[in-house]
Image (spheres, rainbow, N blue to C red):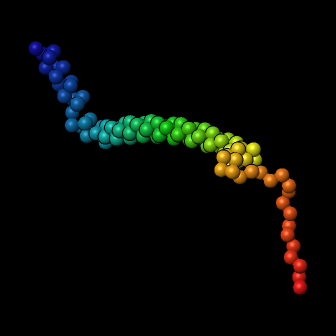
Amino acid sequence: MKEAEKAGQQVKQWLGDDWTSRMLPYIFYLAILGIFYISNSHYSDKTTRKINKVKSEVEELRTDYTTLKAETLMLSKRSEIAQKVANIGIIEADKPAYEVEMADD
């Protein structure tokens, strides 16, 4: 029984008011630092996911832009325009355009 009492006294001495009051600010500091570290880690993971999402959206929009640009260039060719307007009866001129001048009186 004396050994148990001796061990109990050692624990009380080790966790006594003096030690607890000295170490409490450091424990709070480490707890706050740990919370900050965890929240910063979550924030950086969330930001990385957002960046990757935006990168994939940009890549998708870039491919759409390239496709639409190629289609527009194809459809704006002279031969393509001639085929489209041939259905409504408009034909391409054989002779080049000329300027009409009016005589000054």
Which one is nearer the viewer's eye here, 3 or 64? 64
Q: Is residue 82 left or right of residue 49?
A: right
In terms of depth relative to the viewer, which is nearer, 92 or 36?
A: 92
Residue depicted at x 19% and y 28%? 12
Residue at horizontal 67 percent and vertical 41 percent from the top: 70
Q: Is residue 90 left or right of residue 33?
A: right
Q: Quadrant of the N terminus?
A: top left
> Residue 20: image x %, image y %?
25, 36
Determine the residue located farthest toward the front in the rendered image.
89
Q: Is residue 33 visible?
A: no
| Residue at horizontal 51 percent and vertical 36 percent from the top | 52
Residue 6 position (above or below residue 15): above
Q: Residue at x 60, y 38 (%)?
A: 63
Residue 28: x and y, percent? 31, 40
Left or right of 41? Residue 8 is: left
Seen in the image, is 16 located left or right of residue 52?
Answer: left
Q: Position of residue 8 (x, y in %)?
A: 16, 22
